[in-house]
Amino acid sequence: MFDLLETMVAVYETGQFTIAADELRVSQSTVSSRIAQLERLVGAPLFDRHAKSDVTPTEAGRVLYATATSIGEQWRDVRERIAREQAAKEEFILLLSHTAASVLLPRAAATLGDALAGFDVAVRALNSDAILAHIGRKGAQLGIVEKPIADDAVQRVTLCHDRLVLAGGEGAEGDVLLVREHGSGVRYYTDLYLKMSGEVPERTMEVSSNAAIVACLASGFGRSIVSRAAVPDGVPCKDLGPEFTRRFYALVPRSGLSRGQRALAGQIVAALADDAG
């Protein structure tokens, strides 16, 4: 029964049997068979099927989803208590955008340090779109990004402000514009700056690491749109106006977290939710 309910939740949240099968690591035929079995048990269709494999929940599907997620939470709580009794640590994966890793991770460090007694904590830096994909698949328990991306399977919480500036000097090496890759939150603002300013840089270089860009700026090479909090000492910077003040956002899976994981995610969010920065 748990397999049936887990499959129903995956289809509900992804909107496709194929994507749900990938998330659950089973075949699409297995997903179809489980949903058909569940529909026979409840005596009503759970999804309306559409073209291109898309599905939408029926009223019965929406009712069962709410119950299934509640049952799933209770089941995970039972497993969590058993795991604690066996001295096992729960996994907690925190994903941060490259800017968030340099600006916000120090502020979350105390909370993460306190959690090490009960969790196996892993922290990784990815771009914002990759973080959304991982959180949507429940491949991590918390993500921090700097653009307001959304997904039905993910709860988004607004965090603190972040002010972007144009950092770097002029001259032979300063006219190189260092840009983040597509899918990065900073790349959106870099493109916005170029559109608003009308600037057409003669030389650009794509660098898929915020830390690497900051290191280049510190050495006197290039210019880049970066967080004001990440600008190295001594590097000149230019304020770009209110359009370049953004917010960080926390992304949390709507389902699939144990009570302990959800509590730790909430503690980290609380530590980052003020308006500093």
Image: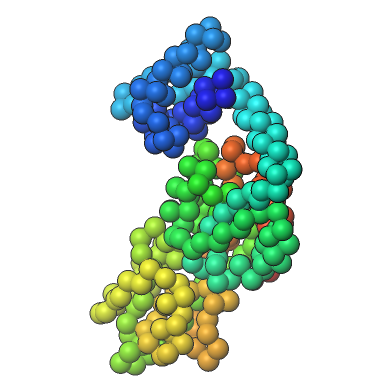
The residue lying furthest to the left in this view is 202
Q: Is residue 206 left or right of residue 87?
A: left
Which of 156/259 is in front? 259
What residue sits 45% from the left and 66% below the top? 186
Residue 94 percent across, percent down from the top left: 57, 56
Quarter holding residue 160: bottom right
Residue 230 percent across, percent down from the top left: 54, 77
Could one spot residue 271 in this view of the protein? no
Picture layout, residue 35 above or below residue 220? above
| Colouring rule applied to residues | rainbow
Q: Is residue 220 left or right of residue 113?
A: left
Which of 265/206 is in front? 265
Picture layout, residue 16 above or below residue 137? above
Which of 32/16 is in front? 32
Counting the numbered discs, the total is 0
What residue sits 58% from the left and 76% below the top? 229
On the rendered image, what quadrant is the N terminus found in? top right
What residue sits 52% from the left and 25% below the top? 3
